[in-house]
Image (cartoon, helix red, strand yellow):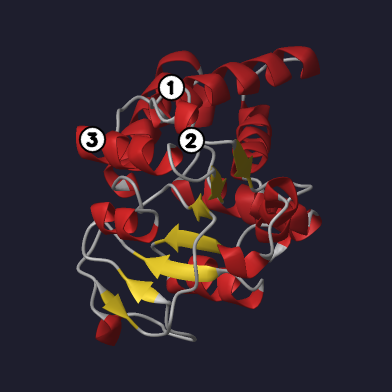
Amino acid sequence: MQCYRPVSPVKAMTFDLDDTLYDNEPIIAGATQALNDRIAELYPAAAALPATQWAAIKRDLIKGNQGLASDMGRLRYETLYHGLAAEKLDDDQRHQAAQSLFDYFYHARSDFAVTDEVRQVLAALAAKVPLIAITNGNVDTVQIGIDEFFTATYHASLGRPSKPHRHMFDEAAQTLDLAPQDILHVGDNLEKDVLGAHRAGLQTAWIAVNRPMDLRHEDVSVLPSVHLHSLAELLWFVD
């Protein structure tokens, strides 16, 4: 552990999920491939659309509704719905097909389990202080087996702007009925997690499981309170 500023007593913790508790990139890659295979099996006309057209659909959707940039689930559903216009489906059929495909992706996206070490650390922390999950993604914490450790889980959405916006950090402080400085936010992204939490008044712990943690190779606006070398080091703040 490396400390960049003094850490005051920690009364609760908030956690990012993707790339903080597990390496998200291969999970998303596998789920995306499974979705593409499903589309090819059931909807060949939509499957024939080039990647550039799918990207254009997504870009135009965000242009028309900036809030979709914070809601990965809704954006994916809307992208599927618009892409399925290539098929001979009426509107109800297209909505049903888009929902079915989204559900297929969502299950595949959450079809993994965190390591025993992560579960053990979360269990030990949760026995000492309340934990809240704050994520820009849409992983199913029940399916991956960590929901029991969190008092609440906040996913960015149309009504919850994505990090680094302070909305979810403020919501967590209100739910916990704590001053922001009493909360330690744990995350991998130095902008979305560290800068976002810092601006909201939280203390911050930086840990990433998807890449070497070298500040020389990161975009740094503000240093974290602490740089962790392992998730288990968080236990130091509650023992």
- In primary-sequence order, the first of circles 3 and 2 is 3
* Residue 223 in which image quadrant: bottom left
Label pair 2/1, CB-CB below 8 angstroms: yes
What is the crowding at mark 1: few (fewer than 14 residues within 10 Å), some, or many (at least 20)?
some
Amino acid bearing label 1: Gln
Q: Which residue is mark 2?
A: 139
Direction from residue 56 to residue 66 in the image, left or right: right
Q: Find the distance from the CA under tag 2 to the CA under tag 1.
A: 8 Å
* Residue 76 in which image quadrant: top right
Query: Closer to the observer: label 3 or label 2?
Result: 3
* Residue 30 in which image quadrant: top left
Is the residue 216 above or below the residue 27 in the image?
below
What is the x, y in percent for residue 239?
34, 53
Q: Which residue occupies 26% across, 78% down?
A: 2
- Name the secondary structure under disc 3: loop
Direction from residue 92 to residue 166 in the image, left or right: left
What is the x, y in percent for residue 132?
56, 45
Amino acid bearing label 3: Thr
Q: Which residue occupies 65% across, 66% down?
A: 180
Residue 144 shows up from this direction: yes
Residue 164 shows up from this direction: no
Using the image as rendered, state which of residue 64 and residue 181 is in the foreground.
181
Q: Which residue is mark 3?
A: 115
Q: Find the distance from the CA under tag 3 to the CA under tag 2.
A: 16 Å
What is the x, y in percent for residue 120?
27, 35
Q: Find the distance from the CA under tag 1 to the CA under tag 3.
A: 14 Å
- Name the secondary structure under disc 2: loop
Q: Which residue is mark 1?
A: 143
- Name the secondary structure under disc 1: loop
For the N terminus, the quadrant is bottom left
Amino acid bearing label 2: Val
